[in-house]
Image: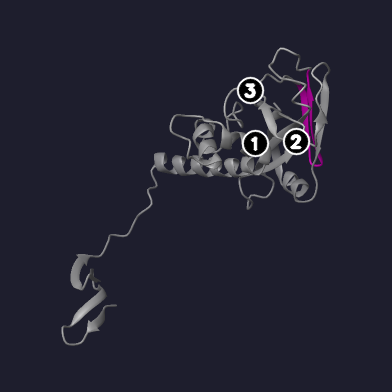
Amino acid sequence: MARIKNELTGRASGKVGQQIYRIRDGKTSLCALPASFKVSQSEKAVTGRSRFGLGLKLAHGLCEIPQLKYFWKNTSVSSGDSNSTPFNKMMKEIYPYVFKDDLDVVLPIVPGLGFIAEKSSATLANDDVTAVINAIGTTQEIDPAVEVTFRLACIVYCKTPLDERKAPYKFIWCISDDIPLNLATTQTISIALEGQKTTLFDMYSTHRAYFTLITLDADSVPVHYSDTFTSV
């Protein structure tokens, strides 16, 4: 609805039919009403929105792990990204591994190459995530004099809801307690799931975990991370 701003001049602002009156710097202008925006339903557009939504949820989950966020914040993944947020860096790097309705088995949750951590086995349950890691060895540029502990960081991708009314996927983020660094022996690392995380796990029939090992110094500052490895 148009409104009269000055009864003597009859100046108006607002919508009249398919036209809009505007007053700017004391002058009245008239322009056409913008056409309503129609969301494209093309296959390409639908796929793009689905991929973006899935990548968005994954990046949000990764940001919930402070040690991972620390690396994304302090690592450059492309030229000119010094002012980019950790979240934006994550989205840019993980998007090529996101499909319309699934994630690639090979997907980086860390910003670049890290040291090699070989998984012997991994088990996922509604109350516990466990990974058995082979001995890391002493040839991976890890300094035991500085890096005194490590943690296992993990994000669990849950899909195929048992109730079709639920979201098609969810993410559970988790990280282990500090573990004394030992490069010479196999390590069995468990992360307890409880409360809402257990409930969420039980709502889905298919689960996949993405892991990375993170070393820390005596002040619990992250130093190095491993390449991403998965539960499958």
Type of amino acid under label 2: Asp
Q: Position of residue 128 (x, y in %)?
A: 81, 38
Local SS, label 1 = helix
> Which residue corresponds to mark 3?
114
Callout 3 crowding tier (Cα within 10 Å): few <14, some 14–19, many ≥20: some
Q: Residue type at mark 3? A: Gly
Rendered image: mark on residue 219: 2
Which residue is painted at 75% across and 13% down in the image? Answer: 138
Residue at image position (63%, 40%) is: 62
- Residue 137 can be seen, yes or no: yes
Residue 13 position (above or below residue 222)? below
**Which residue was labeled with disc 1?**
68
Q: Quadrant of the N terminus?
A: bottom left
Residue 84 in the image, given as x and y percentages of width and height: 49, 40
Please identify the residue farthest to the bottom as the structure is shown: 8
Q: Which residues are magenta?
A: 120-134
Distance from the alpha carbon under mark 2 to that under mark 1? 16 Å
